[in-house]
Image (spheres, rainbow, N blue to C red):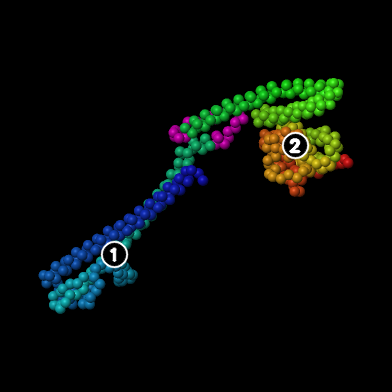
């Protein structure tokens, strides 16, 4: 819920509560005042009758009964409310009455006189007051809602523009936010703080990108020199005479190779994050996939893997950088081979909308999405740097593709699926190749 709507809701609740209390107070206050006025009139009439009775100016009771309600039997004294039938309206109307004793000439004892006055005028006045108060409440609540909409569209418009700018901001564009200075002080301070923050982010990002590029460039040459010198060292005849030196140099050479692969993977990730692959051309993924699978056939035979390659007859063309397309397929296929079991299976399916690679493998548990994390391995003893799926995810994110990792058959069936467009109709012609090695 929006901030302004939330505050307006509380204002409406508070206004309604205060208005209800005020309306009740006004209602009972007016009712009390009107009743007090009626009681004053009745008391004044009583005093008038008592004064006339003392000076013997009242007519006999028989004649007085035609004008007043008089009873020779004792009646409850004081003020009371009662309902009397209105002969003209034919309905019960409220009345306020006052009963008191009165000594009249010619009577042996006092008689009880009841004076009455209608409260219809008071009730009508209260109804008018209540109607006016409810109308004012409706106008007030409607005015608050209209004011809220106006404030949301006018006063809060700078905040909405700032929010839209933040949603569309991309740090990899290497540009700081350029936010205007609104007339409202709070929004102006917010935009100024966000602009300064984005400037610091861009500066830090540029420094980090430059450091990464320099580090990758500076470490590439020493690694290549180390690898070449170790290869020459392994070919020296003197190394074969020392049984202890050979394994040490071989281990050192293997560590250098792993370090070189790690360096290449991290450099590729850095280039993808820095958007250094701006050139996108149509790439025939069907041809590239067939070449990659053909190049891995010796590895399939060495690990006794049975594979099934399913490619649609229609060309599968995707707009992307050729180097990233090659890296995407290479990492997907290597992941399916490295994390397979000896004598296992591998299924590769390419359509106009997606690439699906499914392979057998050791049982794993947990969230498959965590396998896309950097340096995440299925096995801690693996020689892989654990960056293959991270590279796949970065490439897919770079071009807006969707990549998913699924586990089936108690975690022993691994499926990676990359979708680059909605599923299209399946062509009739297919090229299927199945190779089984014993």
Verify CB contact (< 8 Å) between mark 1 and mark 2: no
> In this rendering, would 258 be left or right of 139?
right
Give the residue at the far bottom of this rendering. 108
Secondary-structure class at tag 2: loop
Q: Is residue 29 above or below residue 389?
A: below
Q: Name the residue nearer the viewer: 147 or 176.
A: 176
| Residue 119 disc label | 1
Residue indicated by mark 2 = 381
Q: Quadrant of residue 418?
A: top right
Q: Name the residue nearer the viewer: 403 or 4.
A: 403
Q: Is residue 111 above or below residue 407?
A: below
| Residue 327 disc label | none
Secondary-structure class at tag 1: loop
Give the residue at the far left of this rendering. 55
Magenta region includes residue 184: yes
Q: Name the residue nearer the viewer: 84 or 432.
A: 432
- In the picture, the quarter occupied by the C terminus is top right
Q: Position of residue 352 (x, y in %)?
A: 75, 40
Q: Residues within 10 Å of mark 2 (few under 14, many from 20)?
A: few
Distance, label 1 to label 2, CA atoms, is 97 Å
Residue extent of the magenta highlight: 164-188
Q: Position of residue 61 (x, y in %)?
A: 17, 76
> In this rendering, would 281 be left or right of 45?
right
Q: Quadrant of residue 115?
A: bottom left
Q: Residues within 10 Å of mark 1 (few under 14, many from 20)?
A: many
Residue, x 55% and y 28% (percent of image)?
200
Q: Name the residue nearer the viewer: 343 or 116.
A: 343
């Amino acid at each position: 819920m929006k901030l302004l709507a939330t505050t307006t809701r509380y204002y409406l609740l508070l206004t309604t509560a205060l208005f209800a209390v005020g309306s009740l107070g006004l209602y009972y206050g007016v009712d009390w005042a009107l009743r007090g006025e009626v009681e004053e009139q009745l008391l004044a009439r009583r005093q008038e009758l008592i004064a006339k009775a003392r000076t013997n100016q009242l007519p006999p009771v028989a004649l007085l009964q035609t004008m007043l309600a008089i009873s020779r039997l004792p009646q409850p004294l004081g003020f009371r409310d009662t309902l009397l039938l209105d002969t003209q309206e034919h309905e019960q109307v409220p009345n306020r009455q006052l009963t008191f004793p009165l000594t009249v000439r010619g009577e042996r004892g006092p008689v009880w006189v009841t004076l009455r006055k209608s409260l219809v005028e008071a009730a009508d006045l209260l109804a008018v007051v209540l109607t006016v108060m409810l109308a004012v409440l409706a106008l007030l609540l409607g005015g608050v809602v209209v004011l809220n909409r106006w404030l949301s569209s006018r006063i809060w418009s700078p905040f909405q523009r700032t929010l839209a700018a933040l949603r569309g901001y991309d740090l990899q564009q290497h540009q700081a936010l350029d936010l205007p200075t609104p007339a409202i002080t709070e929004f102006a301070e917010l935009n100024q703080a966000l602009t300064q923050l984005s400037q610091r982010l861009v500066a830090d990002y540029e420094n980090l990108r430059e450091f990464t590029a320099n580090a990758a460039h500076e470490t590439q040459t020493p690694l290549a020199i180390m690898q070449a010198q170790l290869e020459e060292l392994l070919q020296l005849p003197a190394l074969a005479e020392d049984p202890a030196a050979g394994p040490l140099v071989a281990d050192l050479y293997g560590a250098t190779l792993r370090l070189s692969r790690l360096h290449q993977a991290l450099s590729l990730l850095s280039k993808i994050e820095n958007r250094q692959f701006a050139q996108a051309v149509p790439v025939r993924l069907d041809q590239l996939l067939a070449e990659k699978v053909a190049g891995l056939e010796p590895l399939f035979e060495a690990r006794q893997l049975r594979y099934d390659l399913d490619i649609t007859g229609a060309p599968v063309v995707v707009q992307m950088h050729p180097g990233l397309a090659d890296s995407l397929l290479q990492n997907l296929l290597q992941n399916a081979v490295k994390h397979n079991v000896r004598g296992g299976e591998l299924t590769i399916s390419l359509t106009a909308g997606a690439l699906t690679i499914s392979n057998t493998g050791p049982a794993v548990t947990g969230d498959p999405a965590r396998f896309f994390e950097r340096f995440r391995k299925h096995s801690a003893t693996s020689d892989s740097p654990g960056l293959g799926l991270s590279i796949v995810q970065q490439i897919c994110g770079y071009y807006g593709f969707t990549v998913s990792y699924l586990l089936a058959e108690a975690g022993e069936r691994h499926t990676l699926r990359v979708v680059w467009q909605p599923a299209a109709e399946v062509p009739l012609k297919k090229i299927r190749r199945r190779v089984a090695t014993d």
